[in-house]
Amino acid sequence: MTRAPFAFVPFGQDAAEGDVCCDGLVDGATLHLSHWPGNDTPAEWKRDTSVEIALAYGRSGEPVARVINNHFDTDGVLAVFGLLEPEVAEAHADLLIAAAEVGDFGDWPRSPRAFWLDAAIARIAGDRTDATAYAHVLPRLPTLFAELDAREDLWGDAWRAILTADARADRDLRVAQVGPVAIFHEVPGAPELPTLLLSKRAPAGVTRWLRAFEERDGSFHYRYELPPHAWADTVTRPTLRKPSRNAIAAKVEGTWALKGELGMVGLLRTREPLRSAPEDVAKRLLSGDATAT
């Protein structure tokens, strides 16, 4: 079977006729295989991650003229690889999906190897542009899959850092719940914990995260967020509608930012620290959050 070619298409440029847009969305693509919001991926292929979509499509035996994407990340490069080399990707399907979940959703890894693969891909890509990262990473993936356990030079530093942070979270992170809101209370003077350490500790079924960063004087900075997967068009993970930020802000004390530096799932954040305790802030936020369930 002739392998389909891959092309990186920068944001703002259009696809060519027959192109299969994998992960990112590119105007003019004939077919979407993507979990990005606004995708036109056919229902039979929809999955939570783009690599799962690519693997499902690869199993179908449907032809691919040319694969394109407009950004580089773990889910994107593994999804592209899944269309270019479906047999190799299928042999490592569980690992690829789990690594994509770490990279795209900040999930705590199902196994250490999922974290290792995500970290190794980031290390190989380095600070290259997205286009050159694809050119550099894609041909190395088959060998990386086979030799991952022995490539501590690529993932060891990141793995040791996350284990250190995990131990610190056991000691310093306080987790509580108010209805559908998970409260993550981080103690003063410590670096912000990575998302996947919060995912590991999030109570089951919560649909909101309140991150509470305590200052040394006992006040708090707050960020109110949807869970990390909520930016994507998902199937297994629940789809969460964004609430009215203005309605929420009207119910809470202090000055809150509704735009800027909120990331892909952020709803609002404090501009100045508050004296109110995290549980009280969570209740106030919920009083204005009509979509929280």
Image (spheres, rainbow, N blue to C red):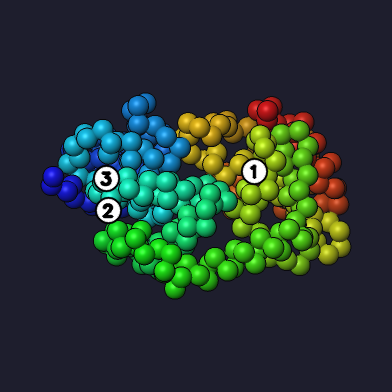
Q: Quick check: can you spot residue 125? A: no
Instruction: Please say if the residues under marks 2 and 3 sit with CB atoms less than 8 Å apart.
Output: no
> Which of marks 3 and 1 precedes in the sequence?
3
Which residue sits furthest bottom? 153
Residue 72 occupies which quadrant of the picture? bottom left
Q: How many marks?
A: 3
Q: Inspect the image, locate mark 3, and give the three-letter code of the amino acid beneath it.
A: Pro
Residue placed under numbered mark 2 in the picture: 8
Considering the numbered disc 2 on the image, is that residue within a helix, a strand or a loop? Answer: strand
Residue placed under numbered mark 3 in the picture: 86
Residue placed under numbered mark 1 in the picture: 225
Of badges 1 and 3, nearer the viewer stands 3
Q: CA distance from mark 1 to mark 3?
A: 36 Å
236 or 273: nearer the viewer? 236
Q: Inspect the image, locate mark 1, and give the three-letter code of the amino acid beneath it.
A: Glu
Considering the numbered disc 3 on the image, is that residue within a helix, a strand or a loop? Answer: helix
244 or 177: nearer the viewer? 177
240 or 116: nearer the viewer? 116
Q: Quadrant of the N terminus?
A: top left
Q: Quadrant of the C terminus?
A: top right
Q: Residue at x 76, y 67 (%)?
A: 189
* Residue 243 falls left or right of residue 148: right
Of badges 2 and 3, nearer the viewer stands 3
Q: 10 Å neighbourhood of mark 3: few (<14), some, or many (≥20)?
A: many
Q: CA distance from mark 2 to mark 3?
A: 19 Å
Which residue sits furthest left? 2
